[in-house]
Amino acid sequence: MLAPFGAGRLYAARKDITAATPIEFGVLQDCAIDFSFTTKALQGQNQFAVFVARGDAKWTVKAKTGILSGRVVNDLFFGQAYTSAAQVAFAAGEAATVPASSAYTCTVANSSTFVADFGVIYTATGLPLVNVASSPATGQYSFAAGVYTFAAGDASAAVAISYTYTTSTGGKIVLTNPLSGTTPYFQGVFRNRDPKSGLFSTYVFNRMTSSKLGIASKNADYSIPEFDMEIMDDGTGNIGTMSFGDAA
């Protein structure tokens, strides 16, 4: 008999593309594996059924992971184009001071890879400035390629600028709108260990897909992404295997 302890480890390798790189669900928090069948009862005149037969079967996996990986999210859920070393980053409230004299411009730190403006506020009050195409008046600003222009009436004002920019680190998923029915498939392996005996139980899911991804954040706590997955026939009539380290 095994007494598995802890969340275990979960790995996956995409199977709908060639030369896929296997990946691990980092810092697995919990993993629930559920088997279920629909049933049909043959009922006579008595209260209990004469016979109950199984109908459709369903095998699902629900996993929560403590580390958010762009490649895991893409390969196991979206199945779209993943580009490494191409992160879109966000500068939230970058501090700047409008010059005391003309020209009243501020260049953001990441102007060379600037993507889009996400607003300017006065640091002292938190009130937003209004974006205009050009020639800003007091309380307004304009921008071009990471250079922000203000009015003479805002000279020496402390402001906070928010914007997006690209970096040569991380990665990004380019989300498109694929045809209905487009589905990434992968093989999954779950392993857990009995700490007393040192023996393992291993479940291999030959072909599965993820139907739901939840990414929730909360104050003073970690964000724990959650994947809902469903196992299916691998095309050969097989579903997977369940292996146990005990000989009983």
Image (cartoon, rainbow, N blue to C red):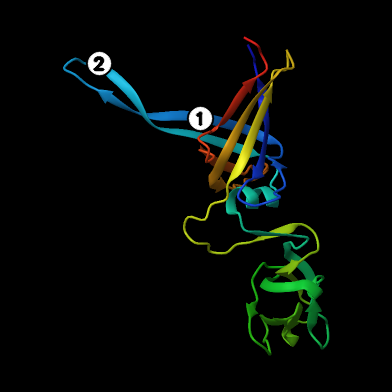
Residue 64 horizontal side relative to residue 211, left or right? right
Nearer the observer, 39 or 121: 39
Residue 146 horizontal side relative to residue 192, left or right? right
For the question of whether residue 123 can be seen, the reply is no
> On screen, 225 above or below 6?
below
Q: Residue 241's x, y, as percent?
A: 59, 28
Q: Residue 123's x, y, as percent?
A: 73, 68
Q: In which image quadrant can residue 98 be found?
A: bottom right
Instruction: Check disc 2 and report the residue beneath it.
Output: 48
Which quadrant holds the N terminus?
Answer: top right
Instruction: Check disc 1 and report the residue beneath it.
Output: 34
Question: CA gap, disc 1 to disc 2?
Answer: 26 Å
Q: In which image quadrant can residue 55 be found?
A: top left
| Residue at image point 55% right, 30% down | 33
| Residue at image point 68% right, 84% down | 138
Q: Residue 93's x, y, as percent?
A: 73, 65
Q: Residue 146's x, y, as percent?
A: 76, 77
For the question of whether residue 183 can be seen, the reply is yes
